[in-house]
Amino acid sequence: MTSADTARTIVGVIGNVISFCLFASPAPTFWRILKKKTTEEFQPYPYIATILNCLFWIFYGLPLVHPHSTLVVTINAIGLAIEIIYTTIFFIYTNNKGRMKVIFWVCVEIAFMAGIVALTLLKFHSHTARSNFVGIFCVVFGVMMYTSPLAIMKKVITTKSVEYMPFYLSLANFLNGVIWVTYALIKFDLYITIGNGLGALSGAVQLILYAIYYKSTPKKGSDNEKPSGVQLSSAPQASAV
């Protein structure tokens, strides 16, 4: 193994650890759902969307599409398992309308993913062509995930409060983007670089806003926790690679 391969492996392992923390960040939300046996105002869309995002990155990292990307596959396989657990908990404790939403969108995702897999294997016959085709979808969904905090950043600016933008989540989001960009640059991977470059930028902006508005944030106890604030924790972690 060359020094570049060794460095890439080390960075990838670190990236796996940070990404795992991001995938696990909504755990308090689902512990709350389990205790109350209701999903309250929470929505399933961030978790369902993350399932599709993980599926694309797993497919991208497979040897038949983009060889030597084992660490991309491992963390997204773990993330997929975690998101399926989240979605299952939501499915159990939501109402019938919520269950229908979950069933509908999961079926749409499965059909869409199956179509992309079939098209990739039948239409493209080289690693480069397959990587380019699948990589475009990975970047598109990654960008959608990483731009999801824009609404909360706007709220921070208008309210001059970081109450609903957790510091450690923003920090982990920034570090996750930086570490995976580093991983991608050691042996250049355009698609991982673009997606996570935007993630690092998004995390950096959140940290800057946090520094600016931390002092002006009203100090409140945990009793004032609102569903919208907890729900936020699921969005930035979606694209872990």
Image (cartoon, rainbow, N blue to C red):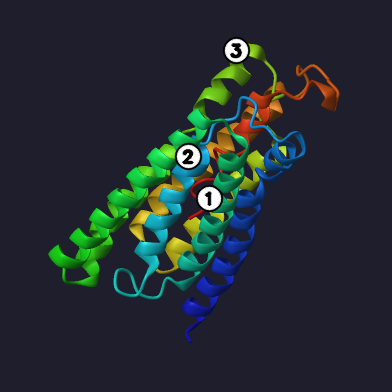
Q: Are marks 2 and 1 in contact (CB under 8 Å)?
A: yes
Decide: is 211 above or below 216.
below
Q: Amino acid at mark 3?
A: Thr
Q: Please report the residue visible at 45 percent of the width from the left and 42 percent of the height from the top.
A: 49
State left or right for residue 181 relative to residue 25.
left
Mark 3 Cα within 10 Å, few/some/many (few <14, many 20+)? Answer: few
Residue 147 in percent (x, y) is at 46, 34
Residue 76 in percent (x, y) is at 50, 60
Q: Residue 157 sits in which quadrant?
A: top right
Is residue 209 in view? Answer: yes
Query: Which residue is labeled 2 in the image?
Result: 146
Q: Nearer the viewer, mark 2 or mark 1?
A: 2
In space, the residues marked 3 and 2 are separated at their CA atoms by 21 Å
The residue lying toward the viewer, choosing from 230 and 42, is 42
Farthest top residue? 158
Q: Please report the residue visible at 51 percent of the width from the left and 46 percent of the height from the top.
A: 238
The residue lying toward the viewer, choosing from 228 and 241, is 228
Return the disc, 2 or 1, that comes first in the chain's sequence.
Answer: 2
The residue lying toward the viewer, choosing from 88 and 69, is 88
Mark 2 Cα within 10 Å, few/some/many (few <14, many 20+)? Answer: many
> Disc 1 on helix, strand or loop?
helix
Query: Which residue is labeled 3 in the image?
Result: 158
Query: Which residue is labeled 1 in the image?
Result: 177
Return the disc, 3 or 2, that comes first in the chain's sequence.
Answer: 2
State left or right for residue 87 relative to residue 134.
right
> Disc 2 on helix, strand or loop?
helix
> Disc 3 on helix, strand or loop?
helix
